[in-house]
Image: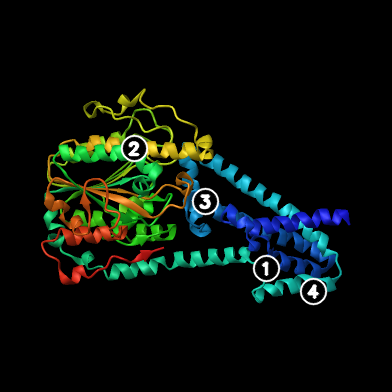
Amino acid sequence: MTRYLLLVAPAFLLAILGLNLPNSLDELRMPQFWSLPVELLLALLLVILAGARLGRQLARVLGLILALMILVRIGDRLLWLWFGRELVIATDIELVLPLLEVSSGGWRFLPLAAVVALLASCALLLAWPLVKGLQAMAGLPRPLALAPALAASLWLMGGPISAAGFTQVKNQVARLADARTAQMRFQAALATDDWRRALPAELFPQLRDVDVLVVFVESYGRSSFDQPEVATAVGPSLDRFAAAAHDAGKILVSGYLRSPTVGGQSWLAHATVASGIRTTGQGGWRVYLQSADADLAHLFGRAGHATFMVQPAIVRPFPEADRLGFDRLLFAEELDYRGPRPGYVTMPDQFTLHRVEQLLDDQVGGPSYGQVALIGSHAPFTPPVPRPVPWAGMADGHVFAGQIEPGMDPAPLWADTNALLDAYKDTIARTLDVLAGWVMLPSARPRLVLLLGDHEPAARVLGRSPGYDVPLHVLATSPDLAAPFRRLGFVDGARPDPSVEPVGMESLRKIMLDGFAHQRHPKLASTDGTAQLE
């Protein structure tokens, strides 16, 4: 009897703890957390009905299935805790290889094998007590199957029986279905987009001689303004940024946008801005890459602008980028940075902006449109962002030798939530100081810069579930270039008005097209720009 209990009790406890894994520690006190999982009851029913011999074999299969359900539940809760979003196995699986390659300096297959081995080991460790517990029940007389059957029936009647495992499976199937319908929604959004058929003369006529830059600042969200412990640290740098814009004779207005992502996957924000379609998942991203023919780069190119993309975080082949409408693609290798690498980040943001200025200076025949990603404020927020160096001596980046301060290793930093928040605050403050120096640089042509956060940092960084709002700073060399944004409620300076409702990031394309047309064409102005791509 003792041996029987030693086998069965761990199986019951593991199933309850794993399948009912709470969203927070507070839920441990809730009765439903300690409910019997219907998945375990049905497994017991099946192995008892199968008899001793077949039941033992069936227990191996059912135990592994329960273990996989628990693993998915753990993964889903960890992703929510760290990044504030749910797991979508069908599309998130493709993120594993690039993440491992970046984090391991290019040696992706060895860490991939380690991850696969770790997951397999976890599955087996979880499955072992479940299998042993189920096998112990397999020899019971078949009439005793009535007990788990009656208990499971309580679930159908709304009784105190949980079904978190089945809910997890149902959610994954639903999320996969959403991803597969993304292409239809994308095509429908394209069909109603009249700007795709606009003549070149109708595209951005007020920006004919204006350099336009869309610059994404990594992990820069509304928390820098309304979360007190972050705002206090970032505030002085925001003031310096605003003062630099004023001293340079530039117009600075600010407001909020609503990002499609939080905690990561910056490319979803990039696709949303470019396409005018809210792109919230990997399925949508893939469809965007296949169907992009009227995003901002294509439209500016048709209007006569030279177009370029600067993405210093891209270190592996990205052939799909050829479809995005850019004349030039500059990734980490093409940017030719020869200085010391600051941790995960391939190069300092100041060097990236230096290369952007070179691109603009080299374009003597007309204006440019550029999409730029600044990654100095990317997780893990260590080592610290280098202090600004003289712009004139930037050259190939050797000037940063000796400028990279030591920082905590990522693992202990992310284990210490107080140190992590401090590192994040310092990262954003230093990034804004770099931008303040960039704003002071002269420009040969009129310029419009849309400087925006891509998303909030992960929930673990802020100590709370982050929102989706991010700041947009509009820097312009004349008041007319800022006028379309003032009409949306954007205000002077670097601090947005918190009472103004943020617009979706997908609206930015339409704001640009409508706002810088000679006059608003009734048919073109009717496009609402609110389509969503999962």
Q: CA distance from mark 4 to mark 2?
A: 64 Å
| Residue 1 lies in quadrant | bottom right
Marker count (numbered): 4
Mark 2 near mark 1, Cβ–Cβ under 8 Å?
A: no
Residue for point 55% across, 41% down: 111
Find numbered disc 3 in the image and state the secondary structure of the residue it sits on.
helix
Residue type (three-letter) at the residue carrying disc 3: Leu
Nearest the viewer among 243 and 320 is: 243
Residue 178 placement (x, y as % from top left) = 46, 66
Visual colour scheme: rainbow
Mark 4 near mark 1, Cβ–Cβ under 8 Å?
A: no
Name the quarter where the C terminus is drawn: bottom left
Find numbered disc 2 in the image and state the secondary structure of the residue it sits on.
helix
Residue type (three-letter) at the residue carrying disc 1: Ile
| Residue lying at the far top of the rendered structure | 402
Which residue carries the number 1 mark?
161
Which residue carries the number 2 mark?
429
User: Residue 322 has which mark?
Assistant: none
Which residue carries the number 4 mark?
146
